[in-house]
Structures are given as C-alpha cells and as structure tokens.
Image (cartoon, helix red, strand yellow):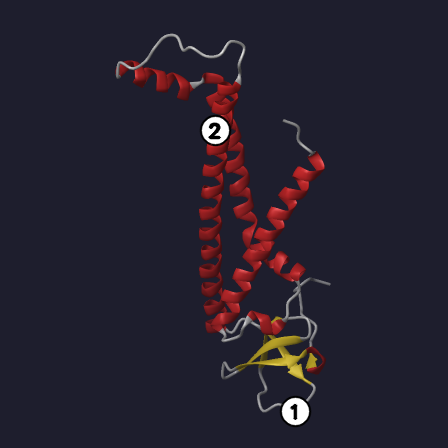
Amino acid sequence: MKFNTSFDVAIVISIVTVFLFANGQAYLSAYLNVFGIDVTSLNLSVQDKVYYGYLNGLHYLLYSLYVLVAYIMLIYCIKCTQCFTNLNQYFLKKAGKYKKTTLRIHNSKFYDRLDKDYNNNSALIILIIVMLFATFYSLLNTENKAKEMAQKDLDSTDFRTVELKKESKSSNIFLIKCGTNVCALMDKNKKTYLEDTKNIVFSVKQTGTKK
C-alpha cells in the first residue's frame, strides 16, 4: 500500500487544526459564559480560536502523540509475535475444533488478504472510537477549567483597567476579552457590556522590568 506523504501530512495538519479550533471555541465559550457574554458577539477570528485552543490544548496533543506511538508499537509487536493467531488456535484446540491442516485453494492468497484487511480495519475503527471519546472528554475538561478560571478572575477582579473616551458613570472599568471590533468590559459592580474598540483607551501595561 503506497502512502502519499504530502496528502498524509495535510490530513494530520487538518485534524490538529480542527481540534485546536474546537478546543479554543470551547474554552472561550465557557469562559465568557460566566460573565453572561456570548462568544459570537465578539466576532473572534479563526486564528484567535486556534491560538487559545493551542494554549489550553497542547497537553492533549502530546497525550494523543503518546497514544499513537504506543498503538504503532503494539500493532508491530502483535504482528511479529502473532499472539492473536496463536491464542485463537490454542482455544480452538482446547475446544476440540482445531485442525492442524486447513484446505485452501492452491496458490490463493484471498483468505490471507481478507484476514489481514479485517484485522487492520477493526484496529482502525477501535482507534477512531477511542479518539472520539477522548476528544469529547478533553473538550469537556477544557470547558470546566475555563469556568473555574473565569470564576477565579471574577472573584479577584484580576483584569486590566481601561478607560472610555466618552463619559462613563463608572470609574473602574475592566477589560475581559477583545474581539475583532468590540471588547467585553466589566464595571466595578460586575456588570458586563460590549464597547467598540475605538471608544476604549488602553494604558501601557507595566511588565516589572528593571531599568
């Protein structure tokens, strides 16, 4: 069976990108939902969601890589030792149904290819099912962590302070997240609202570096 390297790499990159996008979407949706803000209102770009997905999902990719390497090693060991075939023959022999010789068509490899394709497809289907469940639980875990982080930030009011160009009744305005055209803000009474980025004055954030 021939493999097209460029095609295989493109598939892998596409799968990883889709996962990072979904993970970023799950993180942002759960985080902003604590503040009563819908993620679609910020109109975040695809690259922003992929970026957040990478920051909060890199360990999931590493776990997937470990599982894939372990799967390849396991399949290699199974094919080298033929443990499943020997185990099947052992149980058939114990049951009294095993025959030392099997009659097949002379010079025909049809049944051998059929058994090989069945084993490969069965292993692939099992791997896909496992990866689907792992993806579901990883996204669920990302949502739970995002909610905990948002609640922690809300309780400590650990946000960047900004000002508005127009007059505002509140003196303390905190920046939650910014999208393409609007930003999610919160006042000292913990009331959130959306504001156009053109109406927001951002102050220089001190990094604490020594002169």
Quarter the C terminus occupies: bottom right
Badge 2: few (under 14), some or many (20 or more) residues near its Cα, within 10 Å?
A: few
Position of 169 relative to 82 (above/below): below
Q: Residue at x 51, y 82 (%)?
A: 191
Badge 1: few (under 14), some or many (20 or more) residues near its Cα, within 10 Å?
A: few
Determine whether the residue tagged by mark 2 lies in a helix, strand or loop. helix
* Residue 130 locus on image (x, y percent): 45, 42
Q: Residue at x 49, y 65 (%)?
A: 30
- Residue 52 location, quadrant: bottom right
Q: What residue type is labelled 1?
A: Glu
Q: Is 191 in front, or is 159?
A: 191
Instruction: Of the two numbered discs 2 and 1 on the same chain, state the one appearing first in sequence.
Output: 2
* Residue 64 locus on image (x, y percent): 52, 41
Position of 67 relative to 170 (above/below): above
Q: Is 80 in front, or is 193?
A: 80
Q: Name the residue under label 1.
A: 167
* Residue 31 locus on image (x, y percent): 51, 67
Q: What residue type is labelled 2?
A: Tyr
How far apart are the two marked residues, 2 and 1, measured between alpha carbons? 71 Å
Determine whether the residue tagged by mark 1 lies in a helix, strand or loop. loop
Residue at the front extreme of this rendering: 105
Q: Which residue is drawn at 56% across and 61% down?
A: 25
Q: Is 169 in front, or is 124?
A: 124
* Residue 107 locus on image (x, y percent): 54, 10
Q: Which residue is drawn at 49% across and 41% down?
A: 128
What number of labels is visible? 2
Residue at the left extreme of this rendering: 95
Circle 2 or circle 1, nearest the eye: 2
Q: In this view, does 20 lie to the left or right of 209?
A: left
Q: Name the residue under label 2.
A: 118
Q: In this view, does 211 lie to the left or right of 139?
A: right
